[in-house]
C-alpha cells in the first residue's frame, strides 16, 4: 500500500512544519492525515482527545507515538489502559524525539498514529 505520510521537517516555536507547510499548535496524525490537536500539555490529554486514534482502530494503527512536550513524562493511566484494551501499543517520549522517530518509522512503513504536543 502506498503511503502519503507527511514528513516532519521542523518543530518548535509552538508548532510543526509538515512537508514544507507550517502548522501552529499541537498535531495529531492518523492514517497519514495531519490535523490540529487541541492538547497543549499532558494535563490536557483525555480519551476524547484521542478519539480519532481509537476510531481508526488496530487495523490502521499499530501503536500511538506520543510526544508529551519538552520533557518526557508518563501519560495518564486511563490513556495507557484504553490503548492496551484497543490492541494498540504506546510509545511516549519528549516531542523532539518523537518528531524525529516519526519520520523514521513512517519511512519503514509502520502503521502508527502520532500525537505531538507542540513545544
Image: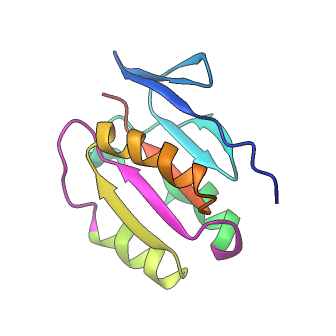
The residue positioned 19% from the left and 49% from the top of the image is 72
Q: Which residue is more in the foreground, 61 or 55? A: 61
Circle count: 0
Q: Which residues are magenta?
A: 58-76
Residue 97 in the magenta stretch? The answer is no
Residue ID at (51%, 43%): 103
Query: Residue 5 or 108: which is nearer the viewer?
Result: 108
| Spot occupied by residue 65 in the image (x, y as percentages of width and height) | 44, 56
> Taking 72 as reference, is 2 left or right?
right
Q: Residue at x 59, y 62 (%)?
A: 110
* Residue 42 placement, left or right of 87: left
Specify the quadrant of the image occupied by residue 25: top left
Indicate left or right for 32 with 90 as reference.
right
Q: Quadrant of the C terminus?
A: top left
Where is residue 80 drawn, in percent x and y? 36, 72
Is 60 within the magenta?
yes
Q: Quadrant of the N terminus?
A: bottom right
Q: Position of residue 79 (x, y in %)?
A: 38, 67
Residue in view at x 62 percent, y 25 percent: 19
x and y, in percent, of residue 23 in the image? 54, 21
114 lies left or right of 20? left
Residue 42 lies, with reference to residue 62, above or below; the image says above
Q: What coloring was used for the rendering?
A: rainbow
Amino acid at each position: 500500500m502506498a503511503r502519503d505520510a507527511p514528513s516532519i521537517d521542523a518543530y518548535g516555536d509552538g508548532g510543526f512544519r509538515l512537508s514544507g507547510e507550517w502548522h501552529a499548535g499541537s498535531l495529531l496524525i492518523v492514517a497519514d492525515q495531519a490535523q490540529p490537536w487541541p492538547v497543549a500539555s499532558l494535563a490536557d490529554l483525555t480519551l476524547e482527545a484521542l478519539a480519532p486514534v481509537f476510531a481508526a482502530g488496530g487495523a490502521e494503527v499499530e501503536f500511538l507515538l506520543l510526544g508529551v512536550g519538552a520533557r518526557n513524562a508518563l501519560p495518564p493511566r486511563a490513556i495507557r489502559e484504553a490503548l492496551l484494551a484497543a490492541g494498540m501499543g504506546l510509545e511516549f517520549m519528549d516531542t523532539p524525539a518523537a518528531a524525529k522517530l516519526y519520520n523514521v518509522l513512517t519511512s519503514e512503513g509502520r502503521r502508527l498514529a502520532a500525537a505531538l504536543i507542540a513545544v
